[in-house]
Image: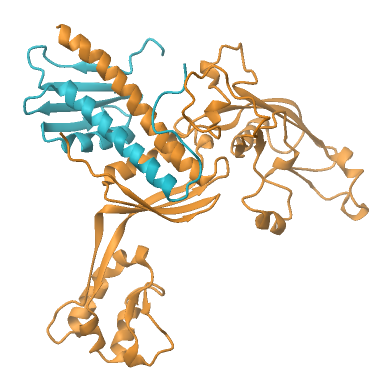
Amino acid sequence: MADEKSLRILGQPDNERERTFIFRDEDHTLGNALRHVLMKNKDTDFSGYSVPHPSEPFMHVRLQTTGAPAVRIMDEGLSNLGQICDHLTAQLEAQGATASWPTGGETTS
Amino acid sequence: MARNRMPKVKVNEMEEHYAQFEIHDTDCSVANALRRVMIAEVVTMAVDLVTFEENTSVLNDEIIAHRLGLIPLKYQYREGETRLRDDIRTTLSSERDIQRRFRFTRECDCDEYCQWCAVKLTLGVAFDERAKHRPEREKDLPLVVTSNDLISEDNDVRPVHFETDAEADDSVDQGITIVKLAKGQELRFTAIAKLGIGKEHSKWSPVSKCVFRPQPHVHLDDDAISKLPPALRDLIIQACPAGVLGYNDDDAPPENRKLVVKNDAAILDFVDDVKTLTQRLSPTGKSMISAFASDTNFIFDIESVGSIPVDDLVLCAIYELKRKLLDLQLAVNDLKDDDDDD
């Protein structure tokens, strides 16, 4: 498992506007939310996701942009969704969920 | 740049085992991601490996092992006593995070399991031995073996017996029933509990209920309704099951009563019935109610099985989602550089 990449990107090198991202070990949980955030980006022309086969651990996200590199828009999408997570954490803490949980960063070495 | 909505949270109820909160200004996809992470991707501990030394009970080993897996195990950080993992570089999460104390067994460098990736629980109950200490008239009754007989060798982790003290007082048993023993029967085993997530097996899922529904927006035409005779207003209430619609003040004289929605959650299912009825009752044929489901506001109802308190659970789920996103962002950036080289 360790040598299996968590992400692969498919696309033509001469056209950076269109990419298919293949996420390993992800499913509808991230797929739909990510697709939605990407669609809200004004540089996005098309965004869709699918889980090609339920017994394989892959989730595909297709992203086509109006001009910007698709990889950059994906990066933005991931960070936007991350910001929503941070915001939710802050809101919950302000509302009396008492534990002090983190807003980002990786914990394991 | 994307225009993203920053959600607002309103907590209605937050207890150890139950929570209800609303998320406003967000989208169904974000709410659903949160729901799915809470069900399937929050890390908890559950019995995973059982070695039987003696089992003469009526249930076979596999059934008992399965039942053990379903007993919630609660990790509790004890200030000054719990030894946290020392291989974590950045300590951004709370000490209450179980992953600050345990590793996944597959990520641990021990041979089989160790104190950093597993907890050993033992149980040894023999009917004849216990019968000696039971009152004379109860000596022959079946002996209930419960989660209370399960002894954890790690003081940070213990089985959960009841949801609340009140429930414990009401119950005739000492905890969650594992099996019943009759005369001469005995049960003895060692159980190994490991970290896991609900995606792998639902015994690791920390929630028994985790749902969200759109917030309903209801508008009642008070003017038109107040012009109806009381009997017809009762008819409107009866169009829905009891408790969905009602009067704001049952003791007031009928003329002064106002029709109100008593159960927000259920009204959406019956709004069509009320609409048709009020259209018929109205002299102008106009409906007196309108209700629709919000696209942006959602109400969450969560019940925990007891392995994690609900407040920690929600935060833990958001953290899990965030961690996933950060990992993927790193992966995207790695590949972005490759992309540029081409």
Left or right of B41? Residue B63 is right
Left or right of B38? Residue B234 is left
Say which colour chain B has.
orange
Please state the total of marks drawn on the protein image: 0
Left or right of B55? Residue B127 is right
Depth check, front residue: A75 or B231: A75
Residue B143 percent location from the top left of the image: 79, 45
Q: Is residue B43 visible?
A: yes
Depth check, front residue: B278 or B226: B226
The N terminus of chain B - image quarter: top left
Residue B175 percent location from the top left of the image: 70, 47
The C terminus of chain B - image quarter: top left
Residue A6 is drawn in which quadrant?
Answer: top left
Residue B153 is drawn in which quadrant?
Answer: top right
> Which colour scheme appears in the figure?
by chain
Residue B340 percent location from the top left of the image: 16, 10
Residue A102 is drawn in which quadrant?
Answer: top left
Say which residue appears at 44% left-offset and 54% top-offset. Answer: B20
Which lettered chain is shown in cyan?
Answer: A
Depth check, front residue: B9 or B256: B9
Q: Looking at this view, name the residue that lies furthest to the top.
A: B341
In this view, B115 is above or below B187: above
Left or right of B17? Residue B221 is left
In this view, B40 is above or below B238: above
Q: Is residue A24 visible?
A: no
Say which residue appears at 11% left-offset and 18% top-offset. Answer: A16
Residue B9 percent location from the top left of the image: 36, 50
